[in-house]
């Protein structure tokens, strides 16, 4: 009997030990899943806490952890590499290709700013040289021989991403020595895969990894936080300059600062810092770093949505319940079946608008757009640039000649403008030199342009924007001249509606995209109804492949039309025409009609169907967009146009 009892006790002890072991294994497995990330192949991996960046103190015995409930799928991101890291603990939350070296473009300027901050004195003054200004790009608007305080140079460097400011800083301290110090600072911060060849990021050899950049911003956040604060400013004014931010993420909820960049080899790059509510212990400070992105704004947006949907930061007990509670009301993450547009009319920031900005906003053009945060909700924002944005060229002495301050372009980009038409009657007011300079400055600020180019080939080539797998093309024409600005082989200019190859150009463009938008500068000024010429051009555009036609020039709003050719039998070939959007921002205060314009919201579905919202945007007495009278979203009725 004793033997039987002994055997039973052994079985009981063994069972208890087995259960305890299983509990421990389950607990260990749970802990392993707390800090997971995606490796280069997209496979989940444990996030590292031990390799916390300098200035980011990893907890020795963390009480809280990251839980990923979306472990079977990663965020939808176009970037070749990305990393999301906690700036307070050093934990990596999500990652892909964290050690892949790539060109980083203007993200370089964070290191430029850091080194300059560390070696400069408060009252240091730099002299602007001709050599510094020979660098690609004109942002900063400096003059040869000008003296600028080092403390002021951080603003054009980080707000406008001025390449000139980067070179001015490097030259002041000795360019070779300065670049050597940039590389030495990378070594100190253990950025082992990082190297710099110039202070601006133009060099393809300025390379790093998303992990190294995470280390850099972790250090800056702790030791030089004022540099990040600069990147959250809308603008900054010195005695002789005003610099506006071209930052896409400015005023996003929880945004703590960051820097983006672009070159053709690097594609779009960015590091953005956010404070996000991911759990029970308040907000988390996270850095989102992308390299080799096709669309940095959407990539970051998708990552933030993923974090809010699937990532929870908190304690072991009750994590599942807390995570489920956190998800209430958060929709599934998937690309929409439509692209959203905002179409705006004529924008002219010279003459009376310029005087108003100087008088009422101390020269800060970004103040004009402070009530237009809604623009950033659209995938694509279009307007017509009525004149050049340049400090070059000679006045042609037209009845009205417009040349805008180049500093408007960072402000336009910061406001959310995606693409501008340059095909209009005022684009040649200051000659080819100002026009070519404007095109270069648009590129520098990552604003696309249509309706013109450096050559006729470029002018005829559609600007293509890809969103959610849909290719949207833009091409523009002026029906108001000037004829002498016609783009030719080897000569910069614009596309004219009188071009004998008009239909062929539209056909060629439409074959390259899913849907084509054609812009026209046409019609008679101040007429509220379109004329026969406008109708003919718009119909011909749709007959030859256009989906949407937008017009500008009359300075007042005109009617709209749903149109299709006789052989059209499906919604994909039905077009929508807005004959005139009216003014976006113009100094025509002599009538109510010219002090307002359409802010047309449009959704274009994958199947070709369209819905529109006719919002009216009103200017106040200082020519600032002030009031939006919201329209009602209406689905266009195509069926009645498809009767055989």
Image (spheres, rainbow, N blue to C red):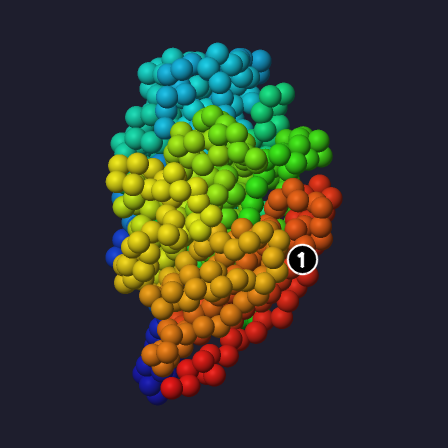
Q: Which residue is drawn at the image coordinates 41% and 74% (left, top)?
A: 564
Decide: is 447 above or below 554. Answer: above
Residue visible at 36% across and 42% down? Answer: 486
Residue that badge 1 annotates: 628
Relative image position of residue 242 (x, y in whole percent): 59, 29
* Residue 169 visible in image: yes
Q: Nearer the viewer, residue 201 or 224?
A: 201
Q: Secondary structure at mark 1?
A: strand
Taking depth in this image into account, of 589 and 405 the one nearest to the observer is 589
- On the rendered structure, is 137 left or right of 324? left
> Residue 593: x percent and y percent?
68, 54
Residue pictured at 38% horizontal, 86% vertical? 644
Q: Residue furthest front?
A: 532
The mark total stands at: 1
Q: Residue 544 at what x, y percent from top left?
A: 33, 66
> In terms of depth relative to the viewer, which is nearer, 581 or 6?
581
Q: In the picture, which quadrant includes the N terminus?
A: bottom left
Q: Position of residue 34 (x, y in %)?
A: 43, 59
User: Is 640 on the left or on the right of 501, as rendered?
Assistant: right
Residue at image position (50%, 57%) is 551
Crowding near pointer 1: few (<14 within 10 Å), some, many (20+)?
A: some
Q: Is residue 228 visible?
A: no
């Amino acid at each position: 009997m004793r033997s039987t009892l002994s055997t039973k006790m052994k079985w009981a002890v063994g069972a208890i030990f087995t259960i305890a072991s299983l509990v421990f294994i389950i607990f260990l497995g749970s802990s392993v899943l707390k800090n997971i990330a995606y490796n280069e192949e997209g496979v989940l991996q444990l996030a590292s806490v031990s390799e916390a960046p300098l200035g980011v103190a990893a907890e020795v015995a963390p009480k809280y952890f990251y839980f990923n409930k979306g472990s079977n799928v990663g965020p939808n991101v176009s970037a070749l590499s990305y990393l999301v890291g906690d700036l307070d603990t050093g934990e990596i939350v999500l990652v892909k290709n964290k050690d892949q070296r790539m060109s980083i473009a203007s993200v370089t300027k964070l290191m430029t700013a850091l080194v300059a901050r560390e070696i400069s004195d408060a009252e240091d003054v730099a002299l602007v040289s001709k050599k510094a200004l020979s660098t690609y790009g004109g942002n900063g608007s400096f003059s040869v021989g000008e003296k600028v305080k080092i403390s002021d140079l951080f603003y054009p460097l980080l707000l406008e991403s001025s390449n000139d400011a980067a070179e001015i800083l490097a030259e002041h301290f000795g360019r070779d020595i300065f670049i050597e110090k940039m590389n030495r600072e990378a070594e100190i911060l253990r950025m082992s895969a990082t190297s710099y060849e110039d202070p601006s990021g133009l060099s393809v050899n300025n390379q790093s990894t998303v992990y190294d950049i995470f280390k850099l911003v972790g250090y800056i956040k702790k030791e030089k936080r004022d540099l990040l604060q600069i990147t959250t400013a809308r603008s900054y004014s010195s005695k002789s300059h005003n610099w506006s931010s071209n930052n896409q993420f400015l005023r996003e909820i929880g945004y703590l600062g960051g820097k983006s960049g672009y070159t053709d080899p690097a594609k779009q790059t960015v590091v953005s810092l956010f404070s996000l509510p991911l759990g029970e212990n308040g907000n988390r400070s996270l850095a989102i770093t992308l390299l080799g992105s096709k669309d940095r704004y959407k990539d970051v947006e998708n990552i933030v949505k993923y974090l809010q949907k699937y990532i929870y930061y908190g304690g072991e007990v009750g994590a599942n319940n807390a995570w489920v509670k956190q998800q209430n009301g958060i929709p599934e993450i998937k690309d929409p079946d439509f692209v959203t547009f905002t179409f705006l009319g004529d924008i002219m920031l010279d003459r009376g608008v310029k005087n108003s900005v100087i008088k009422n906003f101390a020269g800060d053009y970004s103040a004009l757009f402070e009530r237009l945060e809604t623009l950033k909700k659209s995938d694509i924002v279009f307007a017509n640039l009525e004149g050049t944005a340049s400090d070059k060229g000679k006045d042609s002495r037209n009845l009205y000649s417009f040349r805008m301050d180049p500093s408007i372009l960072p402000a336009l980009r910061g406001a959310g403008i995606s693409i501008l038409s340059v095909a209009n009657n005022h684009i040649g007011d200051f000659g080819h030199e100002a026009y070519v300079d404007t095109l270069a400055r648009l590129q520098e600020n990552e604003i696309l342009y249509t309706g013109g180019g450096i050559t006729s080939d470029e002018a005829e080539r559609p600007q293509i924007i890809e969103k959610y797998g849909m290719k949207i093309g833009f091409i523009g024409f002026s029906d108001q001249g000037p004829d002498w600005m016609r783009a030719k082989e080897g000569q910069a200019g614009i596309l004219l509606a009188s071009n004998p190859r008009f239909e062929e150009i539209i056909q060629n463009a439409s074959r390259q995209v899913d849907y084509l938008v054609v812009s026209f500068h046409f019609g008679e000024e101040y007429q509220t109804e379109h004329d026969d010429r406008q109708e003919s051009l718009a119909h011909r555009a749709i007959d030859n492949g256009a989906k949407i036609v937008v017009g500008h020039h009359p300075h007042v709003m005109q009617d709209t039309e749903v149109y299709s050719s006789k052989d059209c039998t499906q919604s994909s070939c039905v077009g929508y025409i807005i004959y005139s959007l009216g003014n976006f921002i113009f100094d025509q205060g002599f009538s109510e009609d010219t002090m307002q314009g359409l802010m047309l919201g449009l959704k274009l579905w994958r199947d070709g169907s369209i819905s529109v919202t006719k919002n009216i945007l009103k200017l106040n007495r200082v020519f600032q967009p002030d009031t939006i009278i919201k329209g009602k979203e209406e689905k266009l009725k195509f069926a009645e146009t498809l009767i055989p």
